[in-house]
Image (spheres, helix red, strand yellow):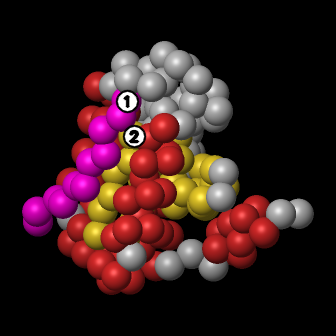
Amino acid sequence: MDKTRLRARQVRRNPTEVEWLLWQRLRFWQVGGFKFRRQQPLGDYIADFVCFEGRLIVEIDGGQHADQKDYDKKRDAWLRDQGFIVLRFWNSDVLQNMDGVFQVIRKNLTSTPFLNSSPQGEGGGQNKNVFKTVVNP
């Protein structure tokens, strides 16, 4: 098993509290019937949550992300090139305003035209925006 897949499996088995809370809202097709996977390997990266059908990735950022902006920028650019939209939320957004976070995710899934649901990103190139979403309580 390659290094990225092994790491994804480890992280999936030990989610942070915030990841676990959001997963309770995303799992079992609760967002407009869209299926999410958690800690999904994509190339050399691991997405916190991904919906292949909606070409949407949801990332939960803790304080360490303030120190790794260049890495996140490079990572997000690669994911956009694969046809994904990336939504980023701070841990505090999820903890203080879960309903607002959920609404932003739902809105992005239900208002975005999807051309292809393949994980290879073919045909989804029109979705090149990266959203740094801050949800105010």
Q: Quadrant of the N terminus?
A: bottom right
Tag 2: amino acid: Ile
Locate residue 103, reporting x and y percent. 25, 45
Residue drawn at point x = 39 percent, y = 40 percent:
85
Whole-number angstrom distance, CA of label 1 to CA of label 2: 6 Å
Q: Viewed as shown, does residue 50 lie left or right of 85?
A: right
Q: Main secondary structure of the magenta part?
A: loop
Task: Determine which residue is flagged by label 2.
Answer: 85
Query: Depth check: 64 or 134 in front?
Result: 64
- Is residue 63 visible in the rendered image? The answer is yes
Q: Viewed as shown, does residue 2 lie left or right of 26?
A: right
Locate residue 48, reporting x and y percent. 52, 60
Q: Secondary structure at mark 1?
A: loop
Position above or below: 49 against 62: above
Q: Quadrant of the C terminus?
A: bottom left
Q: Viewed as shown, does residue 89 lie left or right of 117?
A: left
Position above or below: 66 against 104: below
Query: Depth check: 64 or 135 in front?
Result: 64
Residue drawn at point x = 66 percent, y = 51 percent:
43
Query: Depth check: 34 or 64 in front?
Result: 64
Tag 1: amino acid: Asn
Q: Crowding near pointer 1: few (<14 within 10 Å), some, many (20+)?
A: many
Marks 1/2 in contact by CB < 8 Å: the verdict is yes
Q: Is residue 90 magenta?
A: no
Q: Crowding near pointer 2: few (<14 within 10 Å), some, many (20+)?
A: many
Q: Earlier in the sequence, mark 1 or mark 2?
A: 2
Task: Determine which residue is flagged by label 1.
Answer: 127
Query: Which region is colored magenta?
Result: 127-137
Residue drawn at point x = 48 percent, y = 24 percent:
124
